[in-house]
Amino acid sequence: MNETGRRKWMQAIAAMGAAGASGYLSKVLAAGDLPPGLHRVDGTATVNGKDAKSGAAVNLGDRVVTGPGSTAVVVMKGDAFLLRSSTTIEIKGSSGTLSDLLIAGGRVLTVWSKKNVAVKAAHATIGIRGTGAYFEVDPKEVYFCLCYGEAVVSGPNMPDKTVVTKHHEQPLLLREGGGTLRADPGPVRNHTDEELVMLEKLVGREPPFLKDGQYPANRY
């Protein structure tokens, strides 16, 4: 697909919204063929410092930033991210496969295909594989909710912490002090199951809580 065609297709999907996808579009989403890029922008966003709209390309090595009061959805093959206001991410990888995500600041909800990925957020590194996870990153602390799946949290002078969840059971507040990272229990906040369903739909999947009877009971 050329750039013009890809942009028009992405803009049409953005206008429709994930919940309205049907027919041929639903089949495309189920096949995981949505082109990499900005699926939707509400407000302002940049890619590598240049203004970007819905339909703009996003590639490995790119830096995506949302402006104040803005949100954006990024799709990278089997991975999808919902960036909230004033968020900065850098997407890294090789041979067409995303392997690292740097969250320099802000808030981002993520869903991942079944591959090993390292998420760097301030002093913490979170190794994940095929999960849904939400991050809030500021200079004082990192909020991390593993919505479902398995992850390993590591940081300075802290033993690796393995987290396994089915439905938001172990949110963590990650704080560094005196050269040591500490992981404390936190609340569930600022992300919803509906957003996870939307992101997974964009890459042709559904969250496991739709299959195991935990939704909509105890919904977030």
Image (tube, rainbow, N blue to C red):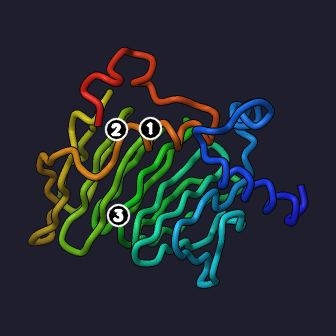
Neighbourhood count class around disc 2 (C-alpha, 10 Å): few under 14, some 14–19, many 20 upward? many
> Percent position (x, y) of residue 123?
28, 66
Figure check: 124 above or below 53: above
Real-space Cα distance between discs 3 and 2? 17 Å
Neighbourhood count class around disc 3 (C-alpha, 10 Å): few under 14, some 14–19, many 20 upward? many
| Residue placed under numbered mark 1 in the picture | 131
Does the residue at mark 2 contact the one at mark 1 (Cβ under 8 Å)? yes
Q: Identify the residue at image location x=42%, y=52%.
A: 109
Q: Identify the residue at image location x=34%, y=38%.
A: 147
Identify the image quadrant of residue 11: bottom right
| Residue placed under numbered mark 3 in the picture | 121
| Residue placed under numbered mark 2 in the picture | 147
Sequence-first disc among 2 and 1: 1
User: Judging from the image, what secondary structure is the residue with disc 1 in?
Assistant: loop
Sequence-first disc among 3 and 1: 3
> Percent position (x, y) of residue 141?
20, 66
Check the picture and name the quadrant holding the N terminus.
Answer: bottom right
Figure check: 214 above or below 130: above
